């Protein structure tokens, strides 16, 4: 186990991931099954697994070879889905979530993965990892199936904060572009700002202001700004990165998921209708599986918290072993390319004057 | 032709609809084809058709029996998709859109239908029809395919105004419930307020305030308030009416449409992949058609402008004849049940004290 090595450097393995074993809807057995899958596929991954040691040791022992790449850290407390972030911030010190973040805080790992309560995870990440110099509001970015060649677009913020002013939106553009560059291998990502129309005079005042700020910043920040985009462009091909506030982004994400799920169920119903349609569905099985694989949310399981001293991957609470393994894969990729340092460098190089290193954690409201 | 009769009474036909023949992407021939379809299906519909008379007369003459139920009003100007609402308000007097709204204004018809520029149509509707007593912001409501037995949920506002305060959201709840009661035949519609979580402490301050106002108003307003709902509930079954501001609603609507369209295209791709899958798609054709029919946006074509002295149905700009006919069907249904009067009575009976008849068009910002 090499967890004590300094994990800040990119490109040389093994890479240590810090895993919160608790807090998911399906319990720690599912998390252990997921990391075991990942361990088999990527011999360069090492894990620090946080949770009740006695229980985790048994689960890990059942998976061949896992114990050799997995260190267990005892943490008996569990953050539940109903816990309020403020409670967890006050009383969460003995939880597996807190412990998992602290392994990133103290440099044992650069990326943490948790299936737990999103609000609590973001609140704890803010106090344990702290915001990157110059960042006012961290954001949660997700990958959205799209018509672009890379198959996915980045969208942020999908719910870290319900507010975002013009400067926050500029930082989301920079962080989202950095994520697309590193996570989707796009050299010059195209960034769009979500609005209710593409004309420049439309929308709320902070969006017009953000339009101006992002336009000016784009040439020096390694991305192309395509201007305002609409809801239909989130799964579209006009932009690779969609920037919006966490309220709108969260509603859009859940609307898209709900719509896809409704269509999936109606499709099943349509095929179950008659003997002929059931026969057709048998023949169509491979085609439908191919489609399902393309848009399967488990394959892109993982919102990424951006703007912190460390990267946190939030897996879906209901993730099964395949979902956990996908989140681990994403975390591994981000650790491998040294994403945390790259993002920090990018934000620092493009920080606007009033939000320099002195301004960590402050909120002065200026946007110049 | 009976267009001069008073159209304010419900229940007795024929019913006159005022149709803007111009402004749609496919031109007046498509609009005439659509109303001709509707005329065949519903002998109780009469039309006043607005646009360049010479052109419209030729188009109407081609459709057997249409001339007998359709009066043409000459209007040579056309509002294009690129015209700014402010320009149209100043210089739009000779347009077919203006003329179509004036037939509702002067009582010849109770419902107008247009495929034209949404922003201009809303702006003109505000000045020509004026807001209902007590209404601060009119809203655009649409029907969204859902898991509910009635097959659709009502969502508003999807883009009349990018802002909405707590009182506006209360009025949207009342107007949306009235639309669901009359348009979807639900006795006690369930109303949900869109937010990023269902817990009462979540979300923006105006949403918490609106939650309180709607809770108090529900018992006397003939609807049930189910509290906060999330994006996934828009196509879901927790509520029949989803209330939100026009910015969020517009993004959600376009995200849902874009997601459905992406899945449709991926489905086609999946079935075109191999010989076997193409064979399967032939067998599955009926099933897929059944699904398509269930969620075909043309079948529920028509956003409805609520909160005005008169009802305006906004058909999609790219609507084909089937789409126009669906919008006409919706307009006819609303005319038949006397929806304009029912909505006005409902809003008046539940108006909060500070927004009584004196307050038309004013915005005092109070919410008590």
Image (cartoon, coloured by chain):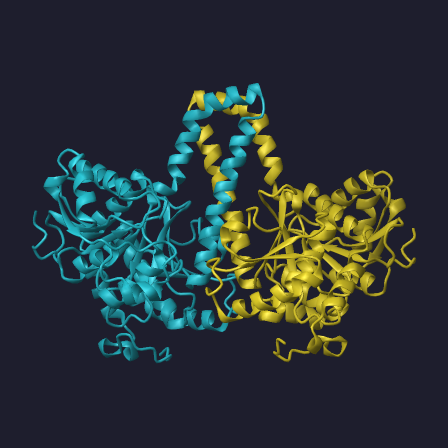
Chain colours: A yellow, B cyan
Vertically, is B125 above or below A360? above
Q: Is B263 left or right of A301, judged from the image as shown?
A: left
Vertically, is B65 above or below A159? above
Of A300 and A356, the residue lying toward us? A356
The answer, for residue A204, to whether it is visible in the render is yes
Q: From the top left corner, tell me how far across and down residue A350 is, in percent.
A: 72, 67
Vertically, is B29 above or below B106? above
Q: From the top left corner, tell me how far across and down residue A172 is, in percent.
A: 64, 63
Residue B62: quarter of image: top left
- Residue at figure coordinates x 18%, y 50% from the top left: B17
Vertically, is B273 above or below B291? above
> Which image quadrant: the C terminus of chain A?
bottom right
Q: Is B41 left or right of A75, judged from the image as shown?
A: left
- How many numbered discs sit on the rendered protein? 0
Residue A108: quarter of image: bottom right
The answer, for residue A75, to whether it is visible in the render is no
Q: From the top left corner, tell me how far across and down residue A104 is, in percent.
A: 81, 61
- Residue at figure coordinates x 29%, y 49% from the top left: B184
Of B223 and B168, the residue lying toward us? B168
Q: Is B57 left or right of A128, judged from the image as shown?
A: left
Q: Is A281 left or right of A74, judged from the image as shown?
A: left
- Residue at figure coordinates x 67%, y 51% from the top left: A302
Of B51 and A246, the residue lying toward us? B51
Q: From the top left corner, tell me how far across and down residue B263 is, in percent.
A: 52, 39
């Amino acid at each position: 186990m090499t967890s004590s090595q300094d994990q800040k450097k990119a490109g040389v393995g093994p890479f240590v991931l810090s895993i919160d074993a608790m807090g998911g809807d399906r319990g720690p057995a599912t998390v252990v099954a997921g990391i075991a899958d990942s361990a088999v596929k990527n011999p360069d991954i090492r894990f620090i697994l946080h949770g009740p040691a006695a229980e985790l040791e048994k689960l890990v022992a059942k998976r061949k070879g896992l114990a050799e790449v997995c260190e267990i850290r005892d943490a008996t407390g569990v953050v539940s889905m109903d816990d309020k972030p403020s409670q967890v911030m006050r009383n969460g010190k003995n939880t597996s979530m807190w412990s998992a973040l602290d392994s990133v805080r103290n440099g044992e790992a650069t990326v943490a993965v948790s299936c737990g309560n999103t609000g609590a995870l973001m609140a704890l990440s803010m106090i344990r990892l702290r915001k990157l110099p110059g960042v006012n509001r961290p954001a949660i970015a997700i990958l959205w199936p799209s018509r672009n060649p890379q198959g996915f677009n980045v969208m942020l913020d999908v719910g870290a904060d319900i507010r975002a002013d013009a400067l926050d939106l500029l930082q989301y553009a920079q962080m989202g572009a950095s994520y697309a560059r590193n996570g989707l291998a796009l050299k010059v990502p195209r960034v769009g700002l979500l609005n209710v129309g593409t004309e420049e005079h439309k929308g709320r005042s902070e969006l017009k202001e953000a339009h101006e700020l992002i336009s000016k910043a784009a040439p020096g920040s390694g991305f192309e700004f395509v201007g305002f985009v609409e809801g239909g462009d989130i799964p579209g091909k006009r932009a690779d990165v969609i920037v919006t506030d966490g309220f709108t982004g969260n509603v859009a994400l859940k609307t898209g998921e709900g719509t896809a799920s409704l269509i999936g169920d109606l499709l099943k119903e349509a095929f179950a209708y008659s003997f002929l349609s059931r026969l057709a569905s048998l023949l169509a099985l491979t085609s439908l599986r191919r489609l399902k694989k393309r848009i399967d949310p488990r394959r892109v399981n993982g919102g990424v918290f951006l703007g912190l001293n460390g990267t946190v991957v939030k897996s879906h609470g209901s993730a099964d072993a395949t979902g956990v393994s996908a989140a681990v894969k994403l975390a591994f990729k981000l650790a491998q390319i040294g994403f945390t340092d790259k993002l920090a460098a990018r934000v620092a190089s493009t920080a606007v004057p009033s939000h320099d290193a002195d301004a960590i954690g402050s909120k002065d409201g200026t946007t110049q």
